[in-house]
Amino acid sequence: CEITRIVELNWMSLTRGPMGIPNIPSFILFGKKFSEPIHKYYICLTLVIITVYIISSIMNSRTGRAISAIRDDELAANVNGIKSSYYKLIVFIISSALAGLAGAFYAHHMSFIDPKSFTFDQSILILSMCILGGMGSIYGSIVGAVILSAVPELLRGLVEYRQIIYGGIIILMAIFRPNGLLGATNLKHIRQRVEFSNKGKEKHIDV
């Protein structure tokens, strides 16, 4: 990430370096301009819904199960005939496409973009969102993003301590809740408890 930022900072012919790319127009769809905040909100919401649907579909498919197997135990997955390099490439392509989509939305939203828009601090923030919400959980990542997007607004007077706060969150989550707020393991336990409770009720009714 940092190497890419440095390349962008020095590639004057493409990115204009530190000067960035100004005067990026607002969203134009079907000949209509969407420049109002409410318009951008609905566009963002639509993109989130589409992204969640695509990722959910992938994770519930054969490809998703292979990716989960590699995540849990790559050696065991390879022994069972899953080509980890192939699926890692798929994950890289999908994540790069989604990152590009988010970057395009950001550029049109801000009307200006430069290499400083995506720094190492931004990468730490995104990582913190995933860890807080729960690694391996789509909805957990959304919850983490909402929480850590609201925190800077609530703590505007503590800007210089922001990285310390994010670091503290990561450490506390690693100690007390390693799977995050809505981690895949946590959701699995919740489903099992609900199913067990429902079975108990059904047996009680039969008696």
Image: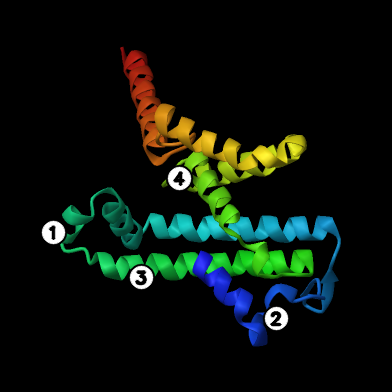
Q: Amino acid at mark 1?
A: Val
**Residue carrying label 4:** 137
Q: Secondary structure at mark 1?
A: helix
Question: Whole-percent x and y of residue 56?
Answer: 46, 54
Res. 114 mark: none
Q: Secondary structure at mark 4?
A: loop
Quarter holding the C terminus? top left
Q: Taking 140 as reference, is 45 left or right?
A: right
Compared to 6, does 184 lie above or below? above
**Residue carrying label 3:** 89
Q: Earlier in the sequence, mark 1 or mark 4?
A: 1
Res. 79 mark: 1
Q: CA distance from mark 2 to mark 1?
A: 48 Å
Q: Residue at x 58, y 60 (%)?
A: 50
Question: Whole-percent x and y of residue 187?
Answer: 42, 35
Q: Secondary structure at mark 2?
A: loop
Question: Whole-percent x and y of residue 6?
Answer: 56, 71
Q: Amino acid at mark 3?
A: Leu
The reply to whether residue 41 is visible in this rendering is: yes
Do the CB atoms of the residues marked 4 and 3 lie less than 8 Å apart?
no
Question: Whole-percent x and y of residue 44?
Answer: 69, 58
Q: Residues within 10 Å of mark 4 (few under 14, many from 20)?
A: many
Res. 16 mark: 2
Quadrant housing residue 86: bottom left
Q: Amino acid at mark 4?
A: Ser
Along the line of sight, the residue nearer the viewer: 69 or 176: 176
